């Protein structure tokens, strides 16, 4: 680290051109100008643009929002930053030209966190648009637009938010993110599978439109580079710059179908914990999360509660980190008694207790639970007349689901709406106390988003859905196309417009509304419009 200081003083009299030349021959992406301390560069000089991953904001509150960026002049090669702290100036303004700056400050981008920056801006006004940007040395980031949440208890006429997830880089282009950017949502909820951890396909599958770089992800640098490859996509960058994101992860941010401390290959849990720690660190580094989510070892506190005036109470859940291993060996299984075991859990004891307490104190019109895998029952009936269920979803954790639905009924949490993803198909479903009985009580509705790109172009209707349709009368909408959901919440209705694309094998496609569902307060269940 002292070498930075020495180097800095040695080059103090050189021109910028000379500095760049030295940097080139030395293989450095950044060279220091004056330093404020032995550890921190106040005005770094970059050989190439450091804001290659764009900007993002997240978790809006009435008086503040998280602002994010990460310095990465060489985004696909670990970042290309020196192993020093670097000062990053941030500002947030009431106008896009920054003539009315509301807050300004300096954050430190640290090598321990991949030179990411998480600013928790406060002192803002509720329910209004803001614009933000960063500066490091002479370089200025893109400008992002964000929006604060309405004041606690305030009457809110309307909130519009997007729901998206499962963006597999190789499988398709991110038209969904591009169209989301144009929606100027109040916020976007991401249901996870932001990246996929698999190795580069290497041309084996001819239907893939582009290639991952590298092997399967294990180390922090592996995950960092994969996030950087995804974040370099201009459509994804535009989506983040358009609205604050509320994020949760699913399995592919770590390893396919992992469950708690178990990966899919039976790796010893103490060994898998090392991989999970690397993955969680890179996730935190990449997402606009508050400091409360800074990982500690292989743990990351992701479940949290946000509120939007008197209109919406939003609990973000984590159904990966604390769950029991999938029942009956995972996959899709007919009659699996283990799925009914009350000792198995998908939320874990602490999170379940936290959520159940929240549900007892909701005073908003809508009780929203945003999470990863579908809670609604989906009898796949594939090749099996007795029924068949996906063990990775809440269908494999029936006791957990029963406890949640019973708690919703017990607390009378107003108008429950579940948001989920993971299955690469759109679904709109009623929530039934017993999904095997059509006359069972309906206690809410669930909107499940399809993928942004995972699975490739897709079809209007999946074969499995077609076969199983008669056995799932609670499902009110389905599409196996790619897309996202545009939700509109008002005091009178919660509406989901299911956006779909004909193709993701071609970039920049127009979105169509494949169908819409509406839920009215006091009338649980989704109706078509
Ligand atoms: Fe996925």
Image: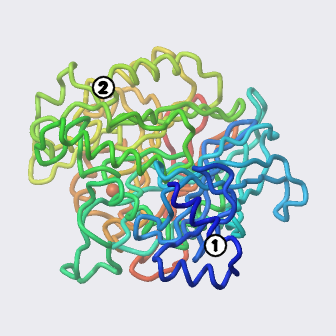
The percent coordinates of residue 76 (x first, y second) are 41, 70
Which corner quadrant of the image does residue 152 belong to?
top right
Mark 1 vs mark 2, foreground winner is 1
Instruction: State the residue at coordinates (27%, 44%).
Output: 378
Q: Total marks drawn?
A: 2
507 up-or-down from 495: above or below = below
| Residue 529: image tag | none
Q: Is residue 227 left or right of residue 135?
A: left
The percent coordinates of residue 485 (x first, y second) are 52, 56
Q: Is residue 468 left or right of residue 159?
A: left
The percent coordinates of residue 86 (x first, y second) are 61, 55
Residue in front for this viewpoint, 247 or 97: 97
Q: How is the image coloured?
A: rainbow
Residue hosting label 1: 11
Q: Can residue 450 be seen at all in this image of the molecule?
A: no
| Residue count near mark 1 (Cα–Cα under 10 Å), binned few <14, some 14–19, many ≥20 | some
**Could you tell me which secondary element the residue under label 1 belongs to?**
loop
The percent coordinates of residue 384 (x first, y second) are 9, 48
Q: Is residue 376 left or right of residue 138?
A: left
Which of the two labelled residues, at mark 1 and mark 2, occupies the earlier sequence position?
Answer: 1
Instruction: State the residue at coordinates (26%, 49%).
Output: 470
Residue in front for this viewpoint, 165 or 282: 282
| Residue count near mark 2 (Cα–Cα under 10 Å), binned few <14, some 14–19, many ≥20 | many
| Residue 400: image tag | 2
Q: Quadrant of ligand 1?
A: bottom left
Q: Can residue 445 be seen at all in this image of the molecule?
A: yes
Instruction: State the residue at coordinates (33%, 73%).
Output: 170
Residue in front for this viewpoint, 53 or 443: 53
Residue in front for this viewpoint, 81 or 170: 81
Rounded to the nearest angstrom, the CA distance separating label 1 from label 2 is 63 Å
Q: Which residue, as the protein is rendered here, is positioned at the far right?
A: 99
Q: CB under 8 Å between callouts 1 and 2? A: no
């Amino acid at each position: 680290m002292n070498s930075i200081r020495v180097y800095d003083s040695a080059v103090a009299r050189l021109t910028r051109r000379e500095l760049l030349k030295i940097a080139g021959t030395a293989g450095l992406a950044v060279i220091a100008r004056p330093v404020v301390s032995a550890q921190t560069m106040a005005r770094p000089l970059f050989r190439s643009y450091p804001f290659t991953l764009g900007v993002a904001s997240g978790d809006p509150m009435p008086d503040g929002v998280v602002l994010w960026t990460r310095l990465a002049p060489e985004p696909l090669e670990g970042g290309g930053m020196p192993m020093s702290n670097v000062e990053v100036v941030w500002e947030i303004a009431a106008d896009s030209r920054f003539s009315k700056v509301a807050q300004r400050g300096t954050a430190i981008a640290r090598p321990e966190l991949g030179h990411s920056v998480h600013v928790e801006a406060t002192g803002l006004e509720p329910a209004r648009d803001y614009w933000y940007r960063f500066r490091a040395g002479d370089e200025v980031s893109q400008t992002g637009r964000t929006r604060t949440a309405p004041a606690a208890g305030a009457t809110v006429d309307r909130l519009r938010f997007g729901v998206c997830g499962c963006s597999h880089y190789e499988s398709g282009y991110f038209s969904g993110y591009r169209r989301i950017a144009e929606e100027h949502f109040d916020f976007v909820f991401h249901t996870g599978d932001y990246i996929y951890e698999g190795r580069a396909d290497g041309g084996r599958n001819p239907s893939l439109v582009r290639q991952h770089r590298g092997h399967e992800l294990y180390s922090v640098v592996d995950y960092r580079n994969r996030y950087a490859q995804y974040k370099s996509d201009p459509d994804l960058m535009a989506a983040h710059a358009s609205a604050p994101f509320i994020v949760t992860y699913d399995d592919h941010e770590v390893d396919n179908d992992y469950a708690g401390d178990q990966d899919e290959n039976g790796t010893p849990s103490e060994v898998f914990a090392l991989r999970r720690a690397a993955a969680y660190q890179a996730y935190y580094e990449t997402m606009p999360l508050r400091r409360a989510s800074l990982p500690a070892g292989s743990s990351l506190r992701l479940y949290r509660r946000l509120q939007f005036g008197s209109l919406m109470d939003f609990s973000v859940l984590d159904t990966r980190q604390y769950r029991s291993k999938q029942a009956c060996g995972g996959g899709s299984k007919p009659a699996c008694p283990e799925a009914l075991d009350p000792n198995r859990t998908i939320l874990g004891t602490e999170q379940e207790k936290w959520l159940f307490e929240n549900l007892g104190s909701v005073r908003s019109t809508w009780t929203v639970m945003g999470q990863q895998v579908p809670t609604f029952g989906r009898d796949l009936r594939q090749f099996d007349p007795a029924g068949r269920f996906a063990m990775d979803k809440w269908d494999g954790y029936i006791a957990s689901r029963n406890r949640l639905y019973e708690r919703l009924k017990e607390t009378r949490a107003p108008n429950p709406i579940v948001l989920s993803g993971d299955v690469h198909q759109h679904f709109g479903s009623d929530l039934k106390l017993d999904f095997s009985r059509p006359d069972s009580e309906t206690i809410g509705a669930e909107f499940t988003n399809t993928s942004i790109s995972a699975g490739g172009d897709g079809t209007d209707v999946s074969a499995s859905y077609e076969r199983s349709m008669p056995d799932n009368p609670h499902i009110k909408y389905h599409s196996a196309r790619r897309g996202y959901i545009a939700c509109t919440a008002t005091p009178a209705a919660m509406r989901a417009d299911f956006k779909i694309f004909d193709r993701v094998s071609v970039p920049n496609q127009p979105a169509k509304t494949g169908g819409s569902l509406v839920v009215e307060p006091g009338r649980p269940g989704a109706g078509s419009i």
